[in-house]
Amino acid sequence: MRLLTALALTMSPILTQDYTWPTDVGKHLSSNFGEFRATGYHLGLDMKTKGTTGHPVYAVSSGYISRIVTNYSGYGRALYLTMDDGQTAVYAHLSKFTPQLEDRLKEKQDAGQTYMTNLFLSPQEFIFEKGDIIAYSGNTGFSFGPHLHFEIRNKNGQTLNPLTNGLSQADRIAPIAEEISFIPLNSESWVNGNQLPQNFSLFRDRTGEYHTPDTINISGRLGLSIKTFDKRQGSNNIYQPHRIEVFIDERLHHTLQFDRLDYNWRPTANFIKDYRNARLNFGNFIKLYRNEADPRVPIHADSTNGILDLTPGYHDIKILVMDALKNTRVIHGTVFNMMPFDITLEPLGETEDLLSFLIQPRSITIPIKSVIAYSFTPFGYADEQISIQSSEPIEAGRIVTVPKKQANRKAIQFIAQNKLGAQSKPVHWINNKVVGDYLSVNVDMDISHTDAGIYVQIQPEQIVSANFSLRLKGEYQYETIPLNQIQPSVYLTKPIPPIWFENVDQIEAILNASIERQVRFEFPYTVAMPGSSITAVSKDSFCSIRTTKSSITSPTLMWIEAVHKHAPVENGNLLSRVYQLQPFERPLLKSVNIGIRYSSKLKDKDKMHLYYYDQKEGWSFIPTENNKERQVLTGEVDHLDAIAIIEDVIPPKIKSIHPGNNGNYPSLELNQFKIKIEDNLSGFEPVEDSFELRLDSQPLIYAYQPNLKVITYELDRPLPIGTHTIQLKIRDRAENETSQDIKFKVY
């Protein structure tokens, strides 16, 4: 009995740890645990500090400082507190530490003559009690504003959600849901008669629960994703929810929970979020399923994959979205699982004001209950929903009439729903007055890559009257694939497995009416397989992608497109075509190698590098190697973005300096040097080689904040009376340099 009691007492700190809040400036957060970032997940909490620095930071529990880090990027100035319960608290972006820690740090920096340190300390060196001041909040490292980044790590180095592991925060507001997405996963998957992913807005009832707008028709294997976020009182910020549960017919189907993360899992974030929706700028959706090839991380439940593969008929879907305090939002939806059916369309005639059509099911005898109609312009643009003037049943079909004025010089799309609730594939009536010549009209081809496979889309520039199909041709392949007319001038294949394209070297669109027309498209596409390395090359042979064995998780069709309309390059010279790496909506697990060959006219240019285009940041520098013998620039990217060769010949700028040139300053009041710098293209590498700072010819150990682009040096003693000189040299990533000497007097 005594042994059990002793064991219970020993374990109680771990099981019931109660940490104090690490600041005294309120418990408001700017970022939550697990949020998606460009580099992966957010691995802690970002605590607001009222937009200022210098607030006391406390030991959340008793323990010792085991590590001190100072860096230009990343966490900037950071402390690691190993606590008595065996876990480690991490404090980042600090401005300064306690005096004894600062002295220990300075000793290390002076010994190495470097600002950047990674200092490990013994358990006996710096011991703190719970609630002791250990540092002061700041804005150092890769920080976008004053705040405290805080983490709790277990003994394995994994980060834990602090709000479910010892920290408490008042919160009464449940998460908010905005949209839900259904994602087809194979060739037999449909959503409302469409095989492409479909997003649906949610509406909120008076009780605060959310609903889909109507019954959604589905069939086959499907994935779900949801656009949702959390809110907390007293803050306008939005946060990542903590846990999501999916129920099908009141039975728990799948869960995911942001409670434990690992630095090694960071590349997997693009497989947890709905990467396609994010890349298409539809917002941040969280996937509620896991593809078979997706990397396994314990965010999704391991026992299920979340994929919907339902029996025929109606099913209730309920989704619970929770925050760390289990405030819960409920989303309701109803799906009807049945394959969409085919219908036929027969024009019956017209009057002065009306057009009449007979719409019938092609093969099933279940009566059609209702019909909706949409008009399209001669060039295929959606126009408006057309009012059905009358709808009369006849056997299993319906005779519908529509106003002639709404169909004037238009094409009409009809979609039917039968009495079981199943939805039809669309059929189209095309007004002969809007038909183009199928023998001469321009035809475009687009290829997209989804979870279900490859879609090939054929789109004439205007509506034509012809039957469409597709041919995949290669040395050992000749495959004809039917096309579904999803809009009057849009024809789409079913999803095709990527491996079907392995030996294809040409695609033909077949337009068949009185005579057959063939439109040929070259095929600069390459099938990349997991576990192997391939090279995809652009049509002009100037740009290439090379995958590694770990770049992708499933067979992927890769290609490169030359971009004709692209974002302008400011403050630099565009020296190549802009190339879009494809498929841009598919995530990479590991980076790929890229290269662009340049002409011999550019071989003497030494300030040209590869850049990728980021929608938020604009043209962004890629660390580049120049093989002058082969005349090719190479680098690595983590996303399949637009890339180009750009020359940066503009030196960086020194925007402001304190102390100023020719200034006079009291000796006791001058305690800091602060220099604001700027570069508009290649930017600064956050390393010491990018900058030189000297005082009276003596090198200084300075700090640099990359987001603010500020160099600072803290004086540890008053300067001697007299004239002094600051010597500054800054260098951007393209090796452009700027230097300046600042003379000032101290009295």
Image: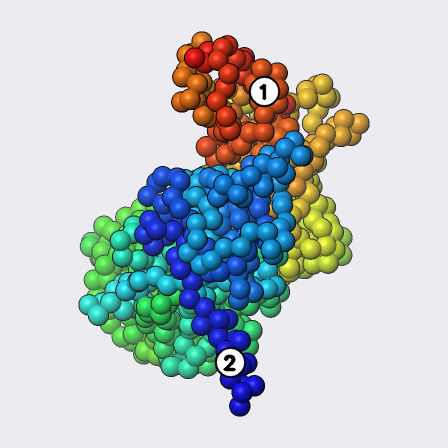
Decide: few, some or many residues near mark 2? Use Cα within 10 Å; few <14, some 14-19, many ≥20.
few
The answer to which of 202 and 186 lies nearer the viewer is 202
Q: Residue furthest right?
A: 629
Give the amino acid at mark 1: Arg
The answer to which of 55 and 681 lies nearer the viewer is 55
Where is residue 648, by image quadrant? top right
Dot 2 or dot 1, earlier in sequence: 2
Give the amino acid at mark 2: Ala
Could you tell me which secondary element the residue under label 1 belongs to? strand
Residue 636: horizontal and vertical position, in percent? 66, 41
Query: Can see residue 132?
Result: yes
Where is residue 699, by image quadrant? top right
* Residue 620 shown left or right of residue 421 in the figure: right
Query: Can see residue 142?
Result: no
Instruction: Single out the mark in the foreground, 2 or 1.
Output: 2
Q: In this view, does 596 lie above or below 78?
A: above
Residue 193: horizontal and vertical position, in percent? 42, 65
Residue under label 2, please give it: 8
Residue under label 1, please give it: 694
Q: Residue at coordinates 71% horizontally, 32% vertically from top-left? A: 625
Q: Is residue 52 above or below residue 384?
A: above
Residue 561: horizontal and vertical position, in percent? 59, 40
Quarter of the figure that contains the C terminus: top left
Q: Residue at coordinates 53% horizontally, 21% vertically from top-left? A: 652
> CA–CA distance between discs 2 and 1?
59 Å
